[in-house]
Amino acid sequence: MKMLLNKKNSLFALTIVTMILCISIVNVNAEVINPEFILPRDVYKYGGDFRIARDTDFDSLNPFSGTGATWMVTITTYEGLVMVDPEWGVAPWLAASWDISPDGLTYTFYLQPHATWADGMPVTAEDVKYTFDQWKEQQLPRMLPYVKNIESVTVINEKTVAIKLYDMDVTFLSRHLSWPSLMIVPKHIWENIEDWNTFVNDDPETHWGSGPFKLKEWKKGEYCQVEANLNYWMGRPYVDTITHIVISNRDMQILAFEKGELSIFNGLNGNEVPRFLDPEKWKIYTIEDSGQPNWYPNTRQRPGNDTEFRHAMWYMIDRETILEAAHFGYGKIPRHMLATPYEVGGWIPPETVTEPMNLTKAAEILDAAGYLDVNDDGWREYPDGDEMELKFSVYDFERFIKCAEILIDDMQSIGINVYLNVFPSSMWAQVHLTTFDFDFAYFRYGPGGGDPLEPMSWSTSWGDNWIGFYNETFDNVYLEASAILDPDERRPLVFELQRIMAENYAYIPHVCNIGLKVLNTEVWDPLPNSLPWGPWSNLQSWHYFNVHLKGEPGAAMVNLAFEAPSEAMQNEPVVIKATITDEEGNPLEGLYIDFWIEGFTVGSQVSKSNGVAEFTWVPIEDGDYEIYTAFPGTGDYQTATTDPITITVGAEEPEPEPEPEPEPTQDNTMLYLGIAAVVIILVAAWFFMKSK
Amino acid sequence: MSGRDYFIKRTVLVVTTIFVVIVINFFLFRIMPANPVDILISPTQGQEKMGIEIKEALMKDLGLDRPLYIQFIIYLKDVLQLNLGYSFRAPRPVIQIIAERLVNTLVLMFTGNVISILMAVSLGVIAAWKRGSKTDLGSLISALTLTSMPMFWVGGIMLLIFSVRLDLFPMFGVTKIGYSHPNFLSYLGDYLHHLFLPMITMALVSFGGLFLIMRNSLMDVFSEDYILTAKAIGLSERTIIFKNALQNAMLPLVTIIAIRIGFMFSGSLLTETVFSWPGLGYTIYQAVEWRDYPILQGTFLIITILVVISSFVAELIYGYIDPRIRTGASSG
């Protein structure tokens, strides 16, 4: 009885544990197919070539070995698992949804059911596994920090893949947001490539991703053009082509934009805004920068390693002047240690820690800490009497130099002997990561959004802690925070981390920049909602998907009809024919017809001279499918949509079992003949003998 | 010195020069501040993720973690096999990148300089012959003005007037974007249309100096006794200028042109940047930005070879124009 009870109890406990486990699996997102920030596909005008200037040539079109300009192309042709949303959170992309296991080690991604590669093949879990595995196997330098924590990638089924980590990493998803290399590639193309490091990926016949565009032409040194992927799983984009033109000189870029050769100009300065105020011709977009420029002391050496000196620095910064003189008014004064966009996600503590400039207070703190002008030369000395001559290093970016000059003026006014050291931007990593040759630095760090723990890892003693800030409490709280999966539970600790940084004056928050872009609205429609045209690559990918020509779809009516069989069989091609004619019944040639199945565009085809556009669909599973066709409209013709019809797809008949081969029938003719011959011979012999 | 000895001596000099350049090429870029990996991971170049880990992996990947002498031996071996390696930034063979761009640069340099020389010679002759006239004064002022103008400024003004305001010429590139040329003539027409503004800009900027040399050289020649004699015996103006004066006045011009070939590449760099002309100059500019050693080594090697060969050819021409150069040693 006791045994039975124990067994019963054990079973009961096991059931309860299993139920708890099942319930506690964190389902982060319900199945979302089309993110809400994607515009509907049939209400704006299609067509046009959207042109953007790039100041450097593309090094390759391989997302894993390229750099800045390359990613601007590859983010439109390839896609990652998740993207950043307008509220700086994580949104679905190739992954329609995902689960995170309670221990935070396993991420299960459910892929978009209708996502296909540009050649029509479905995007599968095998592709995701292959891509992740190859990042590790190919030893791609840029991917190593990302993949080192991945233990295994397992295919659950055709559209589900699980990624297991060695250690819990709450920033695992956020990393995708700022890492344009993390793109999934088709296994059936890339498995033929031996070395991913040297693969240039410039052949339009094989540069096939799952993105809304595909490569049309890369003319080395001149331009790179991508064209609309008619089979894109979220519907084809509005623009026909995007052309990235190499114009290295910024002044020439502005000239080309003003002339109308470019559709958009990125990187407008605040003082250039008055040139583009005509609302008939231009629209200026402001973008709150995710990265926050900060004033950093080098805490490896004095005086940066003295908390009291850093305390004095807290009051030396004149943000109002910097905002006006260096940012021309396009900036935001932060309240706390993190960049202002983190306000949206509720990641910044409620209190304000940044304070207005107060040089008198700064001087008092310095006096009290022993930084006095002992030898009356007009400059303060270290408390031990040593001369103090400090280096303020910034790279050759105009705005940074201006900010540093303002800071230096204020510091000098209270007797700090500091001079400006401007170095080429190419030496940034050497100065900040190798030689640490600075007393003060001015730099913008650029987190990708999502979880703020990622940028905060740089201030831990084991992170890429280039300013040398070390605080044991900070490290401990960071470890504690990084073990909590639920963002709401983690939030108080993230506040705590910021407070520790502020109390120790780890760095001095500066002014957050607001970037400016200007769109040519004579040709292009300003986007109806204010999309954050952010600095991150995948933000720009939405923008490319949504941008459209100015004007309404045309006024002339069209007649659209289509025919398809009402019944079909699984894995057998179904031909759907759409016919488009004008009001008088004349066939219209060269118009795109979209084919919709179960609410998704599965392909687009161009109508031929007889007005017919033909699409072949192969149903993979049996069931009823609602099918219709749509014409998205052009500058001349209105949109049109057909009524849906339902196709019933029957299950594939099982292969009939092969009938057993009939046993080969033995040919007995010779036997009978032989017997007959023997009988005849015997009879003849008998007669012969008898006759004798 | 016989013509054969002269040729051999020059050839040995050319080969030695190229070898020295190969050696300098390797060490020059490695003593520049910052290494290519620093730039590849720099947040200023679109790389948001900085990190020591990525840096170390890239150093290994590019072979920069090896001792310098090993890198040099590998480089020397590769160059002798005409293998200029792979670009650090673009995973493509350097020779392929150079080949794509070299043609554009040579076309721009050649056409720009030919026009400039033709203008300098013809206007120089007229100005020198009509010394003190309004034509002379006008040419002189134009030449001095053009010489003193920075290339990028002239290019910008040309673009502003002829491309932005008058819309006569394109602003960038070598061909129309996305245009499929039905035949070679169509392509050539498009190419020349794009070439016109950078070519004229280059010609105008280099015209001034050449004009002044030509004019002064001709004026010296015109004051020689043999010109006076030619005039005295009643030779026509045309004969005196083209048969007697011009050949002698060309000597300093040829010398200057030979010396300037190296500078022409730097001139093309600025022109290419202003007009977004995808040539070697622009490639060098980008490679310096990115510390792309293989590209820099490759382009400098190719440019050196071109300059050395051009100088060699110029010296042969010089020897042809003035036999005293060729036989100088033996007669001296």
Image: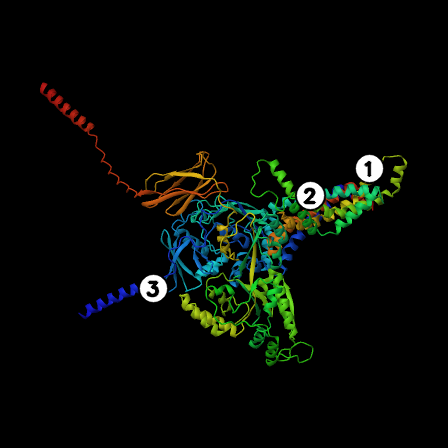
Residue B217: image quadrant is top right
Q: Give how far apart the Cα atoms at labels 2 and 3 are.
A: 74 Å
Picture quarter with the N terminus of chain A: bottom left
Residue A615: image quadrant is top left
Q: Give the secondary structure at mark 3.
A: helix
Q: Chain of mark 3?
A: A
Q: Give how far apart the Cα atoms at labels 3 and 1 are.
A: 100 Å
Residues behind callouts 2 and 3 on a single chain: no
Task: Count neighbours of disc 3 (C-alpha within 10 A) and say few if under 14, some if 14 to 19, many if 20 or more.
Answer: few
Task: Count neighbours of disc 2 (C-alpha within 10 A) and say few if under 14, some if 14 to 19, many if 20 or more.
Answer: some
Three-letter code for the amino acid on which mark 1 is drawn: Lys
Which numbered disc covers residue A24? 3
Residues behind callouts 3 and 1 on a single chain: no
Q: Is residue B42 visible?
A: no
Instruction: Name the residue tied to disc 1.
Output: B243
The relative height of residue A40 versus residue A368 in the rendered view (above or below) is above
Q: Where's residue A400, x and y in %?
A: 61, 64
Q: Chain of mark 1?
A: B
Q: Where's residue A498, x and y in %?
A: 49, 70
Task: Count neighbours of disc 1 (C-alpha within 10 A) and say few if under 14, some if 14 to 19, many if 20 or more.
Answer: few
Q: Where's residue B125, x and y in %?
A: 81, 41
Which of the two discs, 3 and 1, sits closer to the camera?
3
Q: Give the secondary structure at mark 1.
A: helix
Picture quarter with the C terminus of chain A: top left
Three-letter code for the amino acid on which mark 2 is drawn: Phe
Q: Are marks 2 and 3 in contact (CB under 8 Å)?
A: no
Q: Residue furthest right?
A: B232
